[in-house]
Amino acid sequence: MKKYLLFDLDGTLTDPEEGITKAVWLALKHFGIEVKDRTELRPFIGPPLWDQFQEYAGFTREQAEEAVKVFREYYTEKGVYENKEYPGIREMLGALKCAGYQLYVATSKPETTAGIVVKYFGFTDYFTYVAGADSEGKRVKKADVIRYLLEREGITDLSEAVMIGDRKHDILGAKEVGMDSIGVLYGYGSREELEEAGAGRIAATVEELEEYLLSQVD
């Protein structure tokens, strides 16, 4: 039986599209890149920002670091609150905790910012710990965040843990550390993306995810 549930944040617990795409738009504008349709920037939701700026705009690592700095200037002040929880998430978290699961957040978002989001939505009491990227850029990729969380919490039997997320980075990160994963379709990843990454199971809705996880309780 699974005991430990690791949740991605953006696109899994909350929908951060407005705040993230605004912050990315401003960062690109800083470099003279104009984007007319901010929905074009949805791929920035989930993956490490450094990687996305390099992939989307062809930035060097140094340019990507500057873009991330501009992004965070807006996001930490305003964008973090331009966010909304997915319907049914709060009820699901409560039900899973009552069923005996230990819940965690594992996100590529900076740990301090992730903590602000979790607190803002009143999710703090549901989670044992909120793990995210460090401020030095050394713990950024999902696998690194997962390893950090597992080590910090003393979770050694990986068969008892599962990573839940909406993008391939969540699934690949879990695979890299030897954990099972569940992909969700109500966020920003497609079924094809999650299947190609190797998700062990896919849930189309919050309700389907909750039903499956509760069915696994002894």
Image: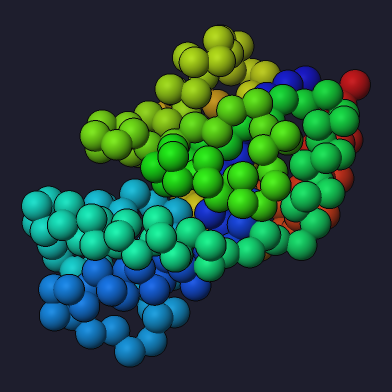
Work out whether 200 lies above or below 57: above
Q: Measuring 53% from the left and 41% from the top, which residue is drawn there?
A: 115
Which quarter of the rendering shows the C terminus? top right
Work out whether 24 lies above or below 110: below
Residue 161, given in percent of the width and then of the height, sits at 64, 24
Work out whether 217 lies above or below 55: above
Q: Measuring 53% from the left and 54% from the top, which residue is drawn there?
A: 10
Residue 65, given in percent of the width and then of the height, sits at 17, 52
In the drawing, does residue 164 fall left or right of residue 131? Answer: right
Q: How is the image coloured?
A: rainbow
Which quarter of the rendering shows the N terminus? top right
Determine which quarter of the picture holds residue 199: top right
Q: Measuring 78% from the left and 50% from the top, which residue is drawn there?
A: 90
Residue 194, given in percent of the width and then of the height, sits at 54, 52
In the drawing, does residue 82 fall left or right of residue 34? Answer: right
**Does residue 181 appear in the picture of this structure?**
no
Q: Measuring 32% from the left and 68% from the top, which residue is drawn there?
A: 24
In this orientation, which residue lies closer to the viewer: 172 or 71?
A: 71
- Extreme residue toward the bottom, this view: 36
**Does residue 62 appear in the picture of this structure?**
yes
In the drawing, does residue 69 fall left or right of residue 141? Answer: left
- Extreme residue toward the front, this view: 77
Determine which quarter of the picture holds residue 77: bottom left
